[in-house]
Amino acid sequence: MPSSTFHYVYILINEDSTPKRYVGITTDLNARLKKHNSGSVTHTKKHLISNAR
């Protein structure tokens, strides 16, 4: 039986002079973005995120 949990795919773009993109997936988008913004995600803690899509 299929799960009723929604999954979100998101793209983060940093503010560096050479922009980088980070693609992720989560079931709780708000909580995940808070983790990225707090610096607790290894791949994005070195770069300030300017845009989420």
Image (cartoon, grey):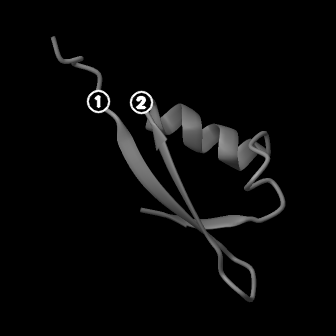
Compared to residue 30, the image places residue 50 above or below, namely: below
Residue 33 on image: x %, y %: 57, 44
Q: Is residue 12 left or right of residue 47?
A: left
Upstream in the sequence, badge 1 or badge 2?
A: 1
Give the residue furthest to the front. Answer: 1
Compared to residue 43, the image places residue 41 above or below, namely: above
> Is 41 or 38 nearer to us in this picture?
41
Say whether marks 1 and 2 touch (CB < 8 Å).
yes
Give the residue type that dot 2 points to: Thr
Q: Quadrant of the N terminus?
A: top left
* Identity of the residue drawn at 75% across and 88% down: 17
Instruction: For mark 1, give the secondary structure.
Output: loop
* Identity of the residue drawn at 78% across and 39% down: 40
Instruction: For mark 2, give the secondary structure.
Output: loop
Q: Which residue is mark 2?
A: 27
Label 1 crowd (10 A; few <14 / some 14-19 / many >=20): few
Residue 15 on image: x %, y %: 69, 76
* Identity of the residue drawn at 34% across and 35% down: 7
* Identity of the residue drawn at 65% across and 75% down: 20
Residue 9 on image: x %, y %: 39, 49
Give the residue type that dot 1 points to: Phe
Q: Quadrant of the C terminus?
A: bottom left
Disc ID at residue 6: 1
Give the residue furthest to the left. Answer: 1
CA separation in Å, label 1 and label 2: 6 Å
> Is 25 or 32 nearer to us in this picture?
25
